Amino acid sequence: DAGVIQSPRHEVTEMGQEVTLRCKPISGHNSLFWYRQTMMRGLELLIYFNNNVPIDDSGMPEDRFSAKMPNASFSTLKIQPSEPRDSAVYFCASSHGNTIYFGEGSWLTVV
Amino acid sequence: GQQVMQIPQYQHVQEGEDFTTYCNSSTTLSNIQWYKQRPGGHPVFLIQLVKSGEVKKQKRLTFQFGEAKKNSSLHITATQTTDVGTYFCAGDGGTSYGKLTFGQGTILTVHP
């Protein structure tokens, strides 16, 4: 049974470049989350989708961040333009019910 | 907003010693969940507690939910090197979609 699939696993980019992170949730899960993890701030919820609709985006840092979920099996998190302080691990997670299943994360470094 | 505090931040133990991490919420929780993240890995769900005063066990792990549903603990008996990782609690404040607020985590190191 495939888990949450994220790509890329690792990305190094230069400041100012656009970054797109991709996620395929577990089939049948109707909730999708994007989290960011850093040493300083821990695990932060960026945005939550339910049935492909953004429900809570209060955690999105600023206008440089945007997220879409065009269908039940795909979501993207875009950062444009990227900044060094965006360096973090970005986790996509999905759920059907209370338990959240995390992907393996996208490790982003902005230099 | 809801805050979830977790202590200690770090814990170093010798293999065979016990370990406990504590979680406190600023608000009453609908439920609390515990996750484990291995170094370089992703958080993995361990358990969910829902009832006031609930105690659940998974082999050497014992999870408790406080009577007031504002605090929780995870206790590991006789730690093993495979227990190494970061343990997170995550509180559900009862929003319509079960929004979880994660604690900062406790990083457990086990020395053989």
Image: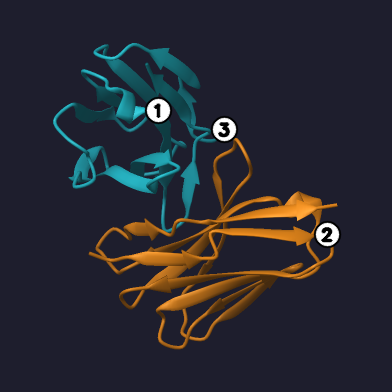
Chain colours: A cyan, B orange
Label 2–label 1 contact, CB within 8 A: no
Q: CA distance from mark 3 to mark 1?
A: 13 Å
Q: Are marks 3 and 1 on the same chain?
A: yes
The span from disc 3 to disc 2 (Cα, nearest Å) is 34 Å
Q: How many marks?
A: 3
Q: Give the residue type that dot 1 points to.
A: Cys
Q: Quadrant of residue B8?
A: bottom right
Q: Which residue is mark 2?
A: B15
Which residue sits at x=40%, y=86%?
A: B68
Instruction: Find numbered disc 1 in the image and state the secondary structure of the residue it sits on.
Output: strand
Secondary structure of the residue carrying tag 2 is: loop
Mark 2 and mark 1, same subunit? no
In the picture as drawn, the residue positioned furthest to the left comes out as: A63
Q: Secondary structure at mark 3?
A: loop
Vertical order, A85 against B29 (above or below): above
The amino acid beneath tag 3 is Ala
Within 10 Å of disc 2 (Cα), the crowding (few <14, some 14-19, many 20+) is: some
Quarter of the image where the N terminus of chain B is located: bottom left
**Residue A52, can we see it?**
yes
Q: Which residue is mark 1?
A: A23
- Residue A75 appearing in the image: no
Q: Judge depth for marks 3 and 2 and give the one in front.
A: 2
Q: Which residue is mark 3?
A: A2
Please tell me whether mark 3 or mark 1 is closer to you in this view: 1
Give the chain of mark 1.
A
Q: Which chain does tag 3 point to? A: A
- Percent coordinates x, y for residue B37 in the rendering: 58, 47
Residue A42, image x and y in percent? 42, 48
User: Which chain does tag 2 point to?
Assistant: B
